[in-house]
Amino acid sequence: QVPLVESGGGLVQAGGSLRLSCAASGRSFGSSAMGWFRQAPGKEREFVATISWNGGTTYYGDSVKGRFTISRDNAQNTVYLQMNSLKTEDTAVYYCAAASRRAIATINRREYNYWGQGTQVTVSS
């Protein structure tokens, strides 16, 4: 059973918005830092956003700062990524991840030990 399942991806025009969701199943990640990463074709996986266990701390990658917002609802065991003012360069597969050994937000990909299967986001010009 996949512990993290992303949804909400799709095709959107530049300037539009999407909200991604990441639902945990089989276990709770309420005490874990959570993050979003993305990977475009031919590129390495890139950090997008992270949030601490209680939502009190968030960090963003420079390319999405001011446009994307990460949030979480521990009661629903779900993490969200609100993406506004989308650009064509935001096109990628977006992955949700959990750092189960860490409560504080982290941008370090190696600290994330649970990953979803990804959801495709395509932004057209």
Image (spheres, rainbow, N blue to C red):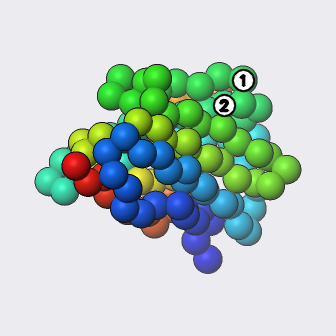
Q: In the image, 89: left or right of 100?
A: left
Characterize the local packing of mark 1: few (<14), some (14-19) or many (20 or more) Cα atoms within 10 angstroms: few
Characterize the local packing of mark 2: few (<14), some (14-19) or many (20 or more) Cα atoms within 10 angstroms: many
Q: Nearer the viewer, residue 21 or 88?
A: 88
Is there any visible trace of residue 29 in the rendered image?
Answer: yes
- In the image, residue 28 lies at what x, y percent? 76, 55
Q: What residue would you read off at disc 1?
A: 56
Q: Nearer the viewer, residue 89 or 101?
A: 89
Q: In the image, 54: left or right of 42?
A: right
- In the image, residue 116 lies at what x, y percent? 51, 61
Element on which disc 1 rests? loop
Q: Nearer the viewer, residue 51 or 7?
A: 7
Question: Circles 1 and 2: CB distance less than 8 Å?
Answer: yes
Where on the picture, by quarter, is residue 25? bottom right
- In the image, residue 101 lies at what x, y percent? 64, 41
Quadrant where the N terminus sits is bottom right
Q: Residue at x 36, y 48 (%)?
A: 38
Element on which disc 2 rests? loop
Q: In the image, 22: left or right of 85?
A: right
Q: Which amino acid lies under the numbered mark 2 shown in the image of this protein?
A: Ser
- In the image, residue 117 lies at what x, y percent? 46, 66
Q: Residue at x 60, y 56 (%)?
A: 22
- For residue 94, above or below residue 4: above
Q: What residue would you read off at disc 2?
A: 52
Where on the picture, by quarter, is residue 76? bottom right
